[in-house]
Image: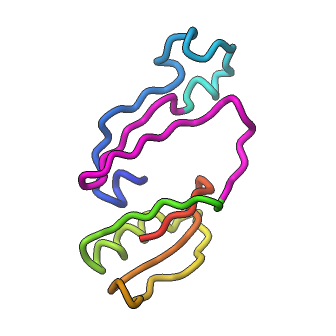
Amino acid sequence: MYQKAFDAEINCLLRYSDAKWEDFHRELSEKQKEYIYHAELLIGNQRIMMADNLDIPFKPSTALSMTITLKTKEDVIRGFEIMQDGSEIIYSVHSTTYSSSSVSFIDKFGFRCNT
């Protein structure tokens, strides 16, 4: 979803099933084996690393957010159209003092995104 929305390049994608057991020292359910152990996404010149953490219970949090700067208003709209499925919109697409187009939402994974 992020790859398509932001024309990103996936440099690395490892699932827990790809990792050595010694790296995390725990038995995993079949579902957990498909979780992301390490991923690297390149958006423009920015490398973003992600992982599903198994050592704490998952709780969506909007205390932190990811802001992605796109070149054109059309890029913002296209990216948001891809990401909006299952998202909670905070601010719909609008112009601001500093940008011709901005949007803020909580994506279907529970992460706050701004463009």
Instruction: Report the front residue among 31 and 21.
Output: 21
Above or below, 17 against 112 in this view is above
Above or below, 110 against 79 in this view is above
The quadrant of the image that shows the C terminus is bottom left
User: x and y percent of residue 64 in the render?
Assistant: 59, 59
User: x and y percent of residue 74 in the render?
Assistant: 28, 78
User: x and y percent of residue 63 in the render?
Assistant: 65, 60
Q: Is residue 35 left or right of residue 75?
A: right
Above or below, 45 against 52 in this view is below
Above or below, 41 against 99 in this view is above
Q: Which residues are magenta?
A: 36-61
Question: Is residue 76 covered in magenta?
Answer: no
Q: Quadrant of residue 65?
A: bottom right
Report the colour scheme: rainbow
Instruction: Report the front residue among 79 and 102.
Output: 102
Q: Is residue 13 left or right of residue 88?
A: left
Residue found at x 56% / y 63%: 112
Question: Is residue 41 covered in magenta?
Answer: yes
Q: Quadrant of residue 106?
A: bottom right
Q: How many marks?
A: 0
Residue found at x 55% / y 15%: 23
Q: Quadrant of residue 93?
A: bottom left
User: x and y percent of residue 32 in the render?
Assistant: 63, 27
Residue found at x 33% / y 59%: 6
Residue found at x 41% / y 88%: 96
